[in-house]
Image: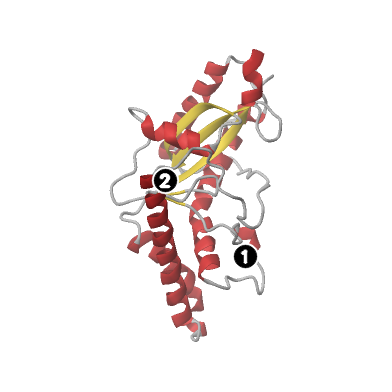
């Protein structure tokens, strides 16, 4: 519950009071990092910078990286999708809607892997239905409640592997093409610009490797079913070290006015 002149900063783009919650998870649908309590109007980059600067904050395991959505800039250790290219899985479904180039193929597999963050929040909000309504608690209590429920979710995932709750994925209100510009209002230093340039080149090399492998197999219809697995291998094995890779996202929790 926020009152006074701070109210406006907690209003999100829908005009609703909320807190921004940044979360990272693995492919076992377990949270590995959660940061709650940020204003609903805060930009994703601010949450990320805060998480990275904290004493016990977010750490990127050696040799790995996070898959992030278009709300974050593509940078070292944080691999985002290609902008201006269709992205969400629903836009690739159906006859004749398969990827037409390297960029679309990259985004398809990026979305397929990053979909786990949508699933974990689906489990989370279905299991803890208290977050479906604005909570009448003090703000600090609301922020801590998110952390407590995230820990409880992890415990249940380890001890009760069969999730009994239906997944309620939120309606996707983002555009079909990632044509939005980077909204990061912070000035980038020369080193940050260099990191972004290197990260973009790295992302392009992944996309080109996927596309080259797919084209080699296009003439063989018997191998078409294996193309998807091979492309995932490129992203999982050649460019990620290890099995369980982290996925990263920001979500909103409403608060009572």
- 9 horizontally vs 50: left or right: right
Q: Earlier in the sequence, mark 2 or mark 1?
A: 2
The N terminus - image quarter: top right
Residue that protrudes farthest toward the front in the picture: 190
Identify the residue at image location x=38%, y=46%.
190
The residue under label 2 is 26
Asked if labels 1 and 2 touch by Cβ distance under 8 angstroms, the answer is no
Q: Secondary structure at mark 2?
A: loop
The residue under label 1 is 92
The location of residue 247, given as percent across then percent down, is: 45, 47
The C terminus - image quarter: top right
The location of residue 89, given as percent across then percent down, is: 60, 59
Q: Nearer the viewer, mark 2 or mark 1?
A: 1
Q: CA distance from mark 2 to mark 1?
A: 24 Å
Identify the residue at image location x=66%, y=27%.
11
Identify the residue at image location x=44%, y=42%.
188
- Mark 2: few/some/many CA within 10 Å (<14, 14-19, 20+): many
């Amino acid at each position: 519950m926020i009152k006074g002149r701070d109210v406006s900063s907690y209003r999100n783009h829908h005009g609703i009071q909320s807190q921004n919650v940044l979360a990272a998870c693995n492919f076992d649908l377990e949270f590995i990092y959660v940061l709650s309590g940020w204003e609903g109007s805060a930009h994703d980059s601010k949450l990320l910078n805060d998480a990275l600067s904290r004493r016990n904050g977010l750490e990127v395991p050696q040799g790995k990286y996070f898959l992030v959505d278009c709300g974050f800039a593509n940078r070292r250790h944080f691999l985002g999708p290609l902008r201006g290219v269709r992205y969400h899985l629903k836009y690739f479904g159906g006859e004749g809607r398969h990827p037409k180039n390297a960029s679309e193929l990259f985004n398809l597999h990026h979305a397929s892997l990053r979909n786990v963050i949508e699933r974990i929040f689906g489990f989370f909000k279905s299991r803890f239905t208290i977050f479906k309504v604005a909570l009448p608690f003090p703000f600090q209590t609301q922020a801590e409640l998110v952390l407590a429920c995230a820990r409880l979710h992890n415990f249940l995932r380890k001890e009760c592997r069969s999730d009994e709750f239906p997944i309620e994925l939120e309606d996707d209100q983002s555009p079909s093409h990632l044509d939005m510009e980077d909204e990061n209002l912070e000035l980038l230093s020369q080193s940050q610009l260099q990191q972004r340039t290197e990260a973009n080149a790295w992302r392009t090399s992944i996309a080109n490797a996927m596309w080259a492998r797919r084209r080699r197999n296009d003439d063989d219809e018997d191998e078409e079913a294996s193309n998807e697995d091979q492309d995932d291998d490129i992203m999982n094995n050649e460019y990620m070290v290890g099995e369980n890779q982290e996925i990263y996202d920001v979500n909103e929790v409403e608060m009572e006015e």
